[in-house]
Amino acid sequence: MSFVRASFAARSAFANARRYSTAPSAGKSSNLPYVLIGAGTAGLAGYLYLNGSEKAQAAAKPKISDKSPLDPQNFVDFKLKKVEPYNHNTAKFIFELPPDTASLLPIASCVIVKSSPDSPAPLVDAKGKPDIRPYTPISPSDLPGELTFLVKKYDEGKMSKYIHEMKLGDKLSIKGPIPKFDYKINQFDEVGMIAGGSGITPMYQILDYALKDPSNKTRFTLIFANVTEKDILLKEEFDALASKFPKTFNVVYTVDKAEQGWKGPTGYVNQELVMQHLPPANLGEKAKIFVCGPPGQVAALAGKKEGMKQGALGGVLKDLGYNEDQVFKF
């Protein structure tokens, strides 16, 4: 492409030279040879500059192996590299991947984690078996060298407490990817999302992937429910996406306990909020609704999920006329 631009510049200069050379010269000698030499030199210089720049950019971009360090069949230990506090009960936990590798997680998918066998105090359930929990990373799938989880610490969450107590250099056993929904760019005209608390991570995974694709035309609307404004995770990231992609993304925050100055909706996600913001059921296969959050919220909105299975559609979405093909519960 660089050569084409350089050639075009040279042809333009040549065309201008021909146009001016046809004018009466009043006996003066023609400057055409010098113009042609200058145009050729400029074109060559432009080509060399652009070609060199592209080669430099390619050289600067780190090479990534086409093989993920994750294993969908076996747990692999990864060291905790860094911890970034996020708010009063949440932090980003960044795990180190081998050099020149990335997670290469498909969109949308998660992983499952457990304590490392090397841990001095392995995390086990009531039956003495390893306690296993699913988590959706928030780092891009092509990010080299790192895998990041946004983990909210729950009072009764044994795994979240365990991760929050990890020290730099400690290992966590991770297995995956675990495919959830095979999302494709422009698969739907409109996508509605309802998330609660830490259930936001699969929504962020899809949004970050889709909105940054130049060919995306799907319009996304996210309703994100939290206890208070301070509990809203990734708010800066969502606000930035809404600002950058105003035609294809809108986010609505709702809280249970509104403090002074709160301007958004208050209370649980209900029929009114869904009807006001999400794509209607009559769009059929052109619309999709994703739901992820605490079990009680998911059951109230879309019916109880049955383990790894979707379970029957129920709740608010069924009452509003959506069918099972239009709704997916993470």
Image: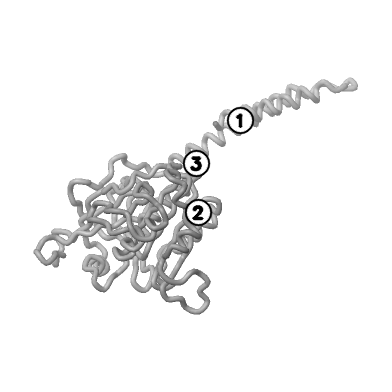
Is residue 283 left or right of 122 when viewed as pictured? right
Q: Secondary structure at mark 2?
A: strand
Secondary structure of the residue carrying tag 3 is loop
Percent across and percent down for residue 158 are 21, 68
Give the side of residue 79 with respect to residue 62, left or right: left
Q: CA distance from mark 2 to mark 1?
A: 38 Å
Please state which of residues 96 and 279 is positioned toward the viewer in this rendering: 279
Residue carrying label 2: 249
Farthest residue in the left direction? 127
Res 92 visible: no
Q: Quadrant of the C terminus?
A: bottom left
Amino acid type, callout 2: Phe
Q: Label 1 belongs to which residue? A: 6
- Residue 255 percent coordinates (x, y): 43, 71
Label of residue 302 in the image = none
The secondary structure type at the circle numbered 1 is helix
Bin the neighbour count of mark 3 within 10 Å (Cα to Cα): few under 14, some 14-19, many 20 and up: few
Question: Quadrant where the N terminus lies?
Answer: top right
Residue at mark 3 to residue at mark 2: CA–CA distance: 14 Å
